Amino acid sequence: MAHAITNVVFDMGNVLMGWTPFAFALNYANTEGEARAVADSIFDSAEWPLVDAGAISEPTMLAIAKSRLPEHLHGALEKTYANYHDLQPVMWATNRLAFALQEAGARLYILSNAGERFRGIAPRIPIFGLCEGVLVSAFEHVMKPDVAIYELFCERFGLAPEECVFVDDSPKNCAGAARAGMCAVRFDGNVETLRAELAGLGVPGAAEYRASRDADEPFEIPAEVQARVKAVMEKLLAEAGRREKHDPRSVPGHEPVLAIEGPDLGWNL
């Protein structure tokens, strides 16, 4: 007997929020070449996944990124790094669809490969206050596409994987979810295609949803949803790092860190 798909688990980057590193850096660099160098030194570096894994701190990554650039670009690097979470564009059409699914009875979640900076990005995600649960890689020291993070997600929120659909733009991350027993839908940027695939899985509200012409335009977040942002964040931080210390999925020598030591870059909540 097929299980009803009632839980929709969203990735963040390129699904709910845009991911445009070059555009972030263009705000602070003098030329396109300098912007490319700054963006690559941060977001396309070997250290970036380590930040997402909670294996190194953001100040450490910043120091390494600086070492790759001439000194005259350090200011642009610091500003890009400090402010990129405020520059990520909201993907309004996806969030609008998610609101409709939730209103129809679906339960929404976020599962993201992200660093500690997630605390600064989260309040800007329109559906954040609607989420039943959120799990972030840096707080758990395990990342997509490792099957362990999907297993941890289901365990944390008491969900059966076969009753979840995972939406991500990365084929590798979707494959990891499928190995954990979830349905997985790769998002290619086309919200109508996503809606149709979710409808095929029987997700509440997907079959009935019809996008308006202004689906890509900003919409007002209901006050009751905004009011829940703090509670969802507090729940996320309270649950972070709750795996047993002997769990082999942890990163040896790195306990979960909820407060970063280092220079104040102006982004902590």
Image: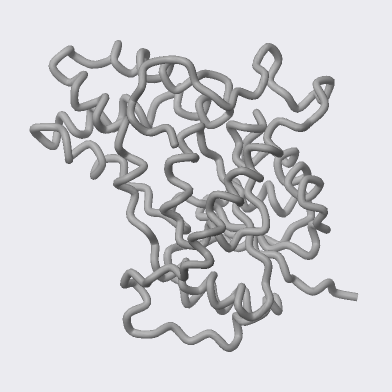
Residue 5: quarter of image: bottom right
Q: Depth check: 129 or 190 in front?
A: 129
Instruction: Write the residue at 52% across / 64% down.
Output: 225
In the image, taking residue 210 as reference, residue 36 lies left or right, namely left
Location of the N terminus (image quadrant)? bottom right
Q: How many marks?
A: 0
Residue depicted at 22% across the width and 33% down the height: 36
Percent x, y of residue 91: 39, 62
* Left or right: 26 as drawn, with respect to 161: left
Q: Quadrant of residue 29?
A: top left
Whether 5 is drawn above or below 214: the answer is above
Nearer to me, 173 or 224 = 224
What residue is at 72 percent from the left and 54 percent from the top? 178
Left-right relation of 188 to 149 = left
Image coloring type = one colour
Residue 75 location, x and y as percent? 19, 22
Pinpoint residue 267: horizontal percent, then vertical percent: 37, 33
Q: Residue at x 53, y 31 (%)?
A: 52
In the image, is residue 165 above or below residue 142? below
158 is higher (above) or lower (below) than 101: above
Q: Position of residue 24 (x, y in %)?
A: 26, 41
- As drawn, the residue found furthest toward the left would be 30
Q: Is residue 151 left or right of residue 220?
A: right
The C terminus lies in quadrant? top left
